[in-house]
Image: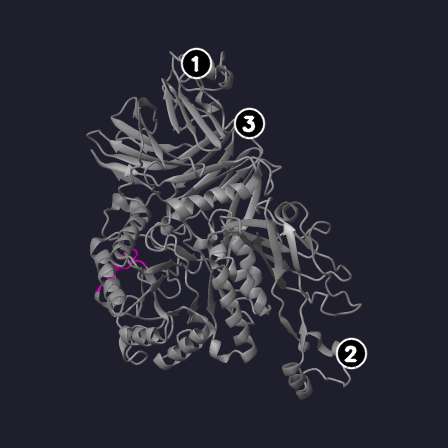
Amino acid sequence: MISRNNNYFLFDTNHTTYAFRVMESGQLEHIYYGNRLNIDMKQENMNRIFEPFIEKKKFLLGNSISYSKEQDKIGLEDLCLEMSSYGKGDIREPFIEIVYPDGSCTSDFIFESASIRKWKDSLKTLPSSYAYEKQVEELNIVLKERNHDLRLHLNYSVYPECDVIVRSSKLINGMNDVVKVKRLMSTQLDFEDSGFVFTSFTGAWIREMNRSDHTVTSGIHVNQTMAGFSSSRANPFVMISSPDTTESYGDCYACNLIYSGNHYEALEVNPYGKSRFVSGINPRGFLWKLNPDDEFEAPEAVMTYSSHGWEELSHRMHEFVREHIVRGEWKYKERPVLLNSWEAAYFDFNESKLLKLAKSAKDLGVELFVMDDGWFGKRDNDTSSLGDWNVNKKKLPGGIKGIADKVNALGLDFGIWVEPEMVNEDSNCYREHPDWAVKIPGQDHSLGRNQMFLDLTRKEVREYVIDSMTNVFADGNISYVKWDMNRIFSDAYSVGLPAECQGEFYHRYVLGLYEVISTLVERFPKVLFEGCASGGNRFDLGMLCYMPQIWASDNTDAICRMTIQQGYSYGYPLSVISAHVSDVPNHQTLRKTPLSTRYHVACYGILGYECNLTELSKDDQNVIREQISIYKEWRKVFQFGDFYRIKDGSVIDQHKNPTGSYQWLSVSKDKNKAVLMDFQSRVIPNLVYNKVHTRGLAEEKEYHFYNIAKKINIKEFGDLVNTVSPIHIKKESITQHVVSKFVKLDEEKEDYIIQGVNLNRLGVRLKQSFGATGYNDQVRYYPDYATRMYFMESVE
């Protein structure tokens, strides 16, 4: 996997190669990252082997800087490098920035040593990827600063089965003086070309993960956040693609950070047509005081490449997250179907109301009941009691144990919501320890959702949170915890840090958070933890190292969720994306969508429900009972199968996709099962034909392709039913209501045996949709926002 011959280094994964060399000047020159090459690293003369692939520089470019008198033909501004710094002629985005004791900022790191090991070391201060024996090899490069006793470690971990390379860096201060670190990136990837499409995923609360594409031909494009967390504003996952890339064609790269704090990703093109990508902790607002003999670790960055488009890129990222990020009891376990109380009750509940919800949930097949916000202190609204983790005995007279035992007695697991990082001013915690809140002494502070952060940079605060949550999680049979965080940072300051260290606050907060979470996860290893931060405000690989799933968005509207969940799918597997079916009108958009559509969208993730099941009609309850039964049967395919974005409805094309159709497909690992969802955003009149096709099925296998036909309420047709009814049925009348209880229309059925190769290449032409010329059970009732789900099972 990792080979070294003198000054040449080469990584081979199953399908990719990465190569660089140590130059005569001591810099690391990046040579290649792409499809796997055939290079024999055992040859004696490696200079001859690599000479065709290296730029030949005989004269310095005009108006550029000669690196040194000895290496006067080398100008760093136009080299592809593994890492870079300011001050020696490279004026592009740097990998590292340091302020030395004399105030100078020029750094010159050159190669000192390298070592290869057959295992991977974990980072000391940060979560990191992991592997079992023979799954990984690691290269450690040590660079020495020419003029100061500093060592920069570059680590490369190679995961051949996933075609992933993980990079990280560490700076060690061997000087007798303090240095200030302004920037230490996790990865740098230089390209000899430009004109790449830089794809980021941006948004806000209840509209996360909107794909944003920018072609970078000159200058710089940046994806970053200063929210204090990875944030819904700009997820740390990004892609870099050739302009002609599609789902199944084209060269593309992806990068993600194993980090939950402020991050920075940039793609820059220099005047000579070369591109540089960097990713790491956001240098804005960051200044780390590195004392003598201390070291500073940067987070790990996960990189992969594909020559077959975004689909293969996603599959490689998905496999890596499942195998080398998610860990513990729930790594391979199918996740339970839950009912969350939030949109059913908000703060207005008591034990009786919760048990009524739980009984209804059990009757419909739900496996886990979750009590959301409002169970502690005086928490009747969002203005009080955060920080006071004592049970409200008026709502829960038997405490957590009492409600948990009663829910368990119904045959359900019990889960609970917490927001441990926050405090309200109206709380005993704040009244007793006002200095524990994040604020600047002597200044007015700003609130978010009426709350403030607890200062997790301080040991005593971390201990308080750990002790409080330990008491909560141990008080009853709790199987699931939803860990929330509902604001971004303002007034960032810690009274526990001296003035010269306030630039360390954001990073130290994240380190404190990781310490708290890792302690609790270790104490409660069987609990299923779900991350949440007003939805997707902290959806990242750092949190997934501790919590195997994350609430994707506070928006449960099915139409919005398709954009959101598809956005996540580029970098994250469905097994980590939590999705719920809610009531209509939707509480975030007031949109009305069919129950089947809400369910089908939520299936492509970890299915849950978030509505008052007790107030639904009997028909809807029966539908949900069947939905949950089907999901359980196909749950492993949905959660752990390979995901394919067959059609993208976010872009309406008058010729290729006029109805705004999404088509999602999940295929089991053994390729024996697959399930496809087809969604239509809008009806085009007199355009009645549709087609679905697949990718990823075993071409030699035959599949039973079918849908599960439902009954259609005649109310959906309004007074159009009078064209066939022997009696006149007035809309919204008692007659319509009575007739609709006994007369249902049949949905169309699709049922075929088809070879995998034909499904992949030709697909299935579906029965025609209603086009205003007639309707029977051979015609699809397919209005705006309609979906169908098609199942495929291999046959002998």
Nearest to the eye among marks 2 and 3: give it: 2
Secondary structure of the residue carrying numbered label 3: loop
Give 405 or 276, whichever is nearer the viewer.
Answer: 405
Q: Earlier in the sequence, mark 2 or mark 1?
A: 1
**In the image, is residue 602 above or below residue 266?**
below
Drawn side of residue 611 relative to residue 710, left or right:
left
Q: Which residue type does callout 1 highlight? A: Asn
Instruction: Specify the label residue 724 is tagged with.
Output: 2
Q: Are there few (<14), some (14-19), or many (20+) residues within 10 Å of tag 3?
A: some
Tag 3 residue: 273
**Magenta portion: prevailing SS class:** loop
SS for callout 2 = loop
Q: Quadrant of the N terminus?
A: top left
Queried whether the magenta region covers residue 438, the answer comes back as yes
Amino acid type indicated by mark 3: Gly
Which region is colored magenta? Answer: 433-443
Q: Nearer the viewer, mark 1 or mark 3?
A: 1
Query: As displayed, is residue 774 above or below residue 444?
Result: below
Farthest residue, direction bottom: 734
Q: Position of residue 768 (x, y in %)?
A: 73, 61
Q: Amino acid at mark 2?
A: Val
- Mark 1 secondary-structure assignment: helix
Residue hosting label 1 = 47
Q: Quadrant of residue 620?
A: bottom right
CA separation in Å, label 2 and label 1: 84 Å
Q: Which mark is residue 579?
A: none
